[in-house]
Amino acid sequence: MKHQKIKVSLRKELGKKATKALRKNKCVPCVLYGGGKNIHFFAEERDFRHIVYTPNVYLVELNIDGEIYNATLKDIQFHPVRDNILHIDFFQIFEGKKITVEIPIKLNGLAEGVKEGGKMQIIRRKLKVKAFAAELMLY
């Protein structure tokens, strides 16, 4: 699990009209789940490029108007034609509480059959893991 810091701003208005205005200004509306209450915020689309367009899993440190929240990306919605990010859901991570994430599988070396001319078939590219966030930071 890799680490990324993002500075975001709290959303003052919710609803369809406010969300459309955010997207028009190249911002992405987001929600942070998992705490006592849901936190609605936004950031520019380019700030999420490092955590979205990669196979790696990131522990994201969200700086929401001065308050720090540790979270992981839970769900993302893309525009069906333009492929822009429409919405992102984050899940808050707490110390001492296990989280479930999908970790990409990285292969090292070659199997004997591949060395002799065979073809490697990869059936799964990610593995679902349930562990503490501190343990996942080691990989």
Image (spheres, helix red, strand yellow):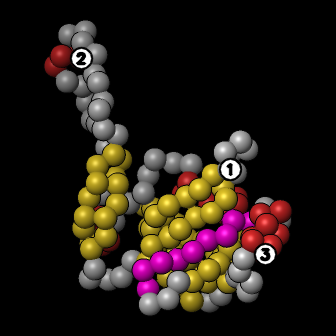
Counting residues from the N terminus, which is met first, the one under dot 2 or under dot 1? 1
Q: Which mark identifies residue 18? A: 3
Mark 2 crowd level (few <14, some 14–19, many ≥20, 10 Å Cα): few
Q: Is residue 81 magenta?
A: no
Q: Regarding mark 2 in the picture, which secondary structure is present there? A: helix
What residue is shown at x 57% (from left), y 75% (from top)?
31
Q: CA distance from mark 3 to mark 2?
A: 55 Å
Q: CA distance from mark 2 to mark 1?
A: 40 Å
Residue furthest top in the image? 117
What residue is shown at x 73% (from left), y 44% (from top)?
82
Using the image as rendered, state which of residue 35 and residue 131 is in the foreground: 35
What residue is shown at x 30% (from left), y 38% (from top)?
124
Q: Position of residue 139 (x, y in %)?
A: 31, 57
Report the mark closest to the observer, 3 or 2. 3
Give the quadrant of the N terminus.
bottom left
- Callout 3 touching callout 2 (CB < 8 Å): no
Tell me the magenta residue range. Answer: 27-35
Instruction: Say if 102 sits above or below 112 in the image.
Output: below
Residue 46 found in image quarter: bottom right
Q: Regarding mark 3 in the picture, which secondary structure is present there? A: helix
At label 1, which amino acid type do we have? His
Counting residues from the N terminus, which is met first, the one under dot 3 or under dot 2? 3
Q: Position of residue 101 (x, y in %)?
A: 34, 60
- Callout 1 touching callout 3 (CB < 8 Å): no
Q: CA distance from mark 1 to mark 3?
A: 17 Å
What residue is shown at x 66% (from left), y 55% (from top)?
85
At label 2, which amino acid type do we have? Val
Q: Which residue is mark 1?
A: 79
Q: Regarding mark 1 in the picture, which secondary structure is present there? A: loop
Q: Which mark identifies residue 63? A: none
Q: Which residue is mark 2?
A: 114
